[in-house]
Image (cartoon, coloured by chain):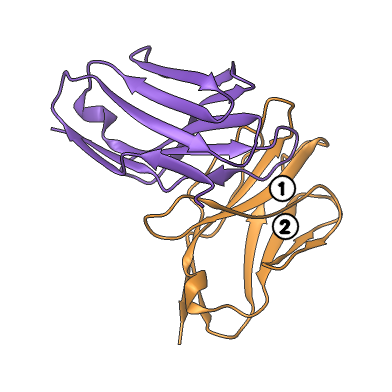
Chain colours: A purple, B orange
Amino acid sequence: DTAVSQTPKYLVTQMGNDKSIKCEQNLGHDTMYWYKQDSKKFLKIMFSYNNKELIINETVPNRFSPKSPDKAHLNLHINSLELGDSAVYFCASSPGHFPEAFFGQGTRLTVV
Amino acid sequence: DAKTTQPTSMDCAEGRAANLPCNHSTISGNEYVYWYRQIHSQGPQYIIHGLKNNETNEMASLIITEDRKSSTLILPHATLRDTAVYYCIVSVLTGGGNKLTFGTGTQLKVEL
């Protein structure tokens, strides 16, 4: 079983569209994250949720809206997609106070 | 979070120990040292972490200097599968999870 799974793996869409990326973890972790890796390979945190509560919200345009329906899911919805949103988005989870984060395989978003 | 400095790239012969250095001279007393790696096109993978003492697990050893201003990740018998970008991160451990700030890392290339 995949510990942290993201769908879709690849997403190609036009500017201005709205899209969602889904993430699910079956590890029973309390905390989930979204990270963005840009074309220069810099990996930056976007959001973290702990028990469905938003904990970390980095300087991210409000076009990006995370939604956590339950502890096992953290979805990322992006409105009005722009060319600069093209990146690989990684979902991750960790067991709260423990330092080990498990990452998904990433979603490569290409905005054309 | 304290900043880290790592060499851009390193080479290692297969079967030899790979020693990856990291400087974190501004680390504060409650910050841990974490190591992650990212194999091409995959999500980051946790390797090891430590606060003050040296640590060892099935993947690697972490040596932290007494003043905590630098550390070394040791892969005792590197294999071709260890070729990856290795990230040294320092961060506090919070109840809401960990804000991992990834730098540029060290590209380790293991060769025959």
The three-letter code of the residue at mark 1 reads Val
Image quadrant occupied by the C terminus of chain B: bottom left
Left or right of A44 in this view: A80: left
Check if mark 1's residue and mark 2's residue have beta carbons within 8 Å: yes
Determine whether A37 is above or below A75 in the image.
below
Q: Is residue A59 visible?
A: no
How crowded pointer 2 is (Cα within 10 Å; few <14, some 14-19, many 20+) is rated as: many
Image quadrant occupied by the N terminus of chain B: top right
Q: Disc 1 vs disc 2: which is toward the camera?
A: 1
Q: In the rendering, at what x and y percent does residue A13 appear? A: 16, 31
Q: In the rendering, at what x and y percent does residue A84 appear? A: 25, 29
Q: Chain of mark 1?
A: B
Q: In the rendering, at what x and y percent does residue A33 appear? A: 53, 31
Question: Does dot 1 land on a helix, a strand or a loop?
Answer: strand
| Residue at image mark 2 | B71
Question: Is residue B96 or residue B18 the one in the foreground?
Answer: B96
Q: Residue at x 65, y 35 (%)?
A: A29
Left or right of A60 in this view: B21: right
Question: Does dot 2 land on a helix, a strand or a loop?
Answer: strand
Q: Residue at x 71, y 47 (%)?
A: B33
How crowded pointer 1 is (Cα within 10 Å; few <14, some 14-19, many 20+) is rated as: many
Q: Which label's residue is closer to the chain start, 1 or 2?
A: 1
Question: Is residue B89 or residue A5 the one in the foreground?
Answer: A5
Left or right of A111 in this view: B5: right
Residue that lies at the very extreme toward the front in this rendered image: A1
Residue that lies at the very extreme toward the top in this rendered image: A62
Determine whether A90 is above or below B52 in the image.
above
Q: Residue at x 71, y 32 (%)?
A: A96
Q: Chain of mark 2?
A: B
Q: Which mark is residue B33?
A: 1
The three-letter code of the residue at mark 2 reads Ser
